[in-house]
Image (cartoon, grey):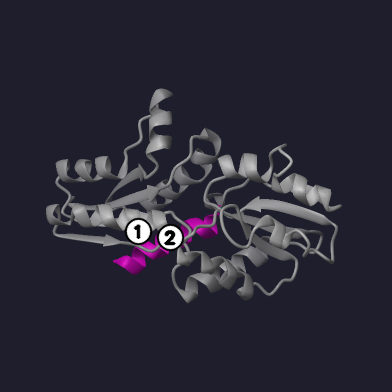
Amino acid sequence: MDKGILVVSFGTSHKDTREKTIDKIVSSIKAEYADYRVYSAFSSYIIVKKLRKEGIVIDTVEEAFERLISDGIKEVIVQPTHIIKGIEYEKLCAVAEKYRIYFSNIIVGDPLISEEEDIINVAGFIESIGSKEYTLVLMGHGTEHFANSIYEKLQKYIKADNILIGTVEAKPTVYDIAEKPKHNKTVLLMPFMIVAGDHAINDMAGDEPDSWKNIFTSKGYSVKILLKGLGEYEFIQNMFIEHIRRAI
């Protein structure tokens, strides 16, 4: 078997969400593409280092490519579990390009939201998990990269007016959206990230005054928390499977 799929995630040090999201995505891909050898790597060196101190060994992207070479893999599909084509995606593409000479072919698949079709599909999925009983507020990561515009595009495709998307590190901020819920005084906060890791636990649901939970509470809303990464949903897992098919 000389064909391989390398699944690349930013990573998380939180075991529970890692098993429910990243590990589940990798398992789903293995089940769907039985004629490929499937590998996994984290792009965050900090998380990889932290996990190794705990006795958990996960390859960096470079280590994974070296493993592919050692195993005699000739054709590689690199499938990121990133949300958008931002900075992390571009870094991944740069590493893949560096290793291109060692393989007969390398294809880097699309992150979750890349084409208009993806925006439509994700918008429909988000609407399906919403409810009239509350305003669903999704916390995205956000980036200085121009790809951050995807969040605003996605918001426009969502027909429900009780679903809002904000970001931790870019626009729209939590303050941009905290005044918007009008029809319901109950807010459900959920990460718009593959894993429910540090950002979800601390920035969204933490006890600090500037956490999203406390900001919405200070505005008079009743706040509920859903610590569930997107990667837990079969619909999202299947989107990554389809992105690999699109790459092939």
Residue placed under numbered mark 1 in the picture: 90
Q: Is residue 241 magenta?
A: yes
Q: Position of residue 159 (x, y in %)?
A: 68, 75
Q: Which residue is more in the foreground, 116 or 89?
A: 89
Q: Is residue 209 magenta?
A: no
Category of crowding for the residue at label 1, using alpha-carbon neighbours closer than 10 angstroms: few (below 14), some (14–19), many (at least 20): few
Q: Assign the C terminus to one quadrant of the image.
A: bottom left
Q: Position of residue 221 (x, y in %)?
A: 84, 53
Category of crowding for the residue at label 2, using alpha-carbon neighbours closer than 10 angstroms: few (below 14), some (14–19), many (at least 20): some
For marks 2 and 1, give the CA distance: 6 Å
Determine contact: label 2, label 1, CB under 8 Å.
Answer: yes
Query: Start and end of the magenta stretch?
Result: 233-248
The correct choice, above or below, for 228 with respect to 155 in the image is: above
Q: Secondary structure at mark 2?
A: loop
* Tag 2: amino acid: Gly
The correct choice, above or below, for 201 with respect to 216 in the image is: above
Q: Which residue is more in the foreground, 72 or 88?
A: 88
Residue visible at 53% across and 71% down in the picture: 119
Judge left or right: residue 175 versus residue 181.
left
**Which numbered circle lies on residue 28?**
none
Residue placed under numbered mark 2 in the picture: 86
Residue visible at 70% across and 51% down in the picture: 189
Q: Position of residue 125 (x, y in %)?
A: 60, 65
* Tag 1: amino acid: Glu
Residue visible at 74% across and 41% down in the picture: 209
Q: Secondary structure at mark 1?
A: helix
Dominant SS of magenta comes to helix
Q: Which residue is more in the foreground, 225 or 179?
A: 179
